[in-house]
Amino acid sequence: MAIDTSQVSKLGFGLMRLPETDGKIDLPQVCHMVDKFIEAGFNYFDTAYVYHSGLSEVAAREALVKRYPRDSFYLATKLPAWEMQGPEDNERIFQEQLERCGVEYFDFYLLHSIEDGSNHDTYEKFGSWDWAKVKKEAGQIRHLGFSFHGSPELLEDVLDRHPEVEFVQIQLNYADWTNPLVRSGRLYEILHERNIPMVIMEPVKGGTLANLPEQITDMYKEARPDKSIASWALRFVGSLPGIMTILSGMSNEAQMEDNLSTFKAFEPLSAEESALVEKASEIWRSIPQIGCTACRYCCDGCPMQINIPEIFRAENTLRIYPDDWRAKGYYRTVTEAGGKPADCIGCGQCESVCPQHLPIIELLQEISGKY
């Protein structure tokens, strides 16, 4: 059965960056945010086996599944190649996900993070595609797709070999449109040409496009003082045809309120605004930044407990504002609570799971001698 994209809300609630208290998911706050999201007329929720060290799916059960009729929302989750040792893990992980989420089926099920190399090879080697088709025939998967962090060439190859794919999740934002590593503009073109519905992740690039250099911020505020900085990134993506839903990993109520206000009466970019976003993109590309989106995949397996995303966040701030004392203080706080960049032993675990394909070891070595 084809996806009726008209029934899927344009804004999706990504459950990867849920609010936390004392290092644990703040479930009452998540429940409150889920309530506001649904009351505003939105219905798409995205989680994964590995988010919040496996507790995101549990939070989805407690905050959503137990509290709302099953046919009132869409729930998506993902199969992680890096947690698999053999073909039997397709079923093992899936059954665990059903139990964690408290459901009998998933509306949208994805093979997680297909990219050139290991993840793609794992799904082929362990028969994940054929296994998923059986689950779809049984009604336990309603719609089958994958999330993607690979090359345009691989995307076309996967789509050619797997016509059963009904949707694809890609990273897309105006900063990555021409990024030679992400190439989101080309990925978008391939999917749009094939009329494949798209789910968009990282539309605000892990929050980076909500905290821009003063020059860009001033441009946006002068043009539309009534709009938040983050809304420009969301409206850029939402103005593109072929987008099924746009995921935002909302960590607090303020972020949710801002996103809801953007999408409740969605206003596509005008020609003048599109030109302004292109100008902002050019300015952004002129600033050397570490392309980290704070997905935190690198953190769980780090033997030295280095908080890599937060170290990179401080470094990026200091690249734009070299004398920012707050960023320097934040760097000290992060490295006192966990490992320092100099503690890196070069094991490569972080680089093996990084969706952005960052040279993390090299970057940590560079940063370790600066502060």
Image (cartoon, grey):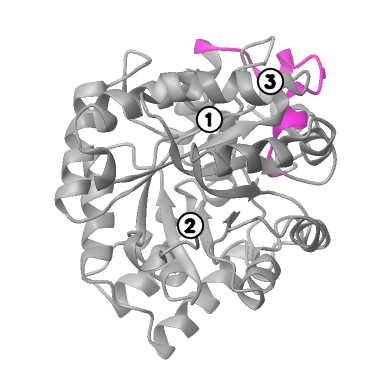
The residue at the point 35 percent across, 79 percent down is 268
Looking at the picture, which amino acid does disc 3 mark? Asp
Name the residue tied to disc 3: 89
Tell me if residue 299 can be seen.
no
**Residue 354 highlighted magenta (yes or no):** yes
Give the SS element for disc 1: helix
Q: Is residue 331 left or right of residue 255?
A: right
Question: Which mark, residue 310?
Answer: 1
Name the residue at the front extreme.
Answer: 138
Name the residue tied to disc 2: 203
Looking at the picture, which amino acid does disc 1 mark? Glu
The residue at the point 60 percent across, 35 percent down is 312
**Stretch in magenta:** 337-356
Tell me if residue 210 can be seen.
yes
Q: Is residue 143 above or below residue 306?
A: below
Percent from the top left, x then y, of residue 125? 85, 33
**Residue 322 highlighted magenta (yes or no):** no
Percent from the top left, x then y, of residue 275? 49, 84
Mark pair 1, 3: CA separation: 32 Å
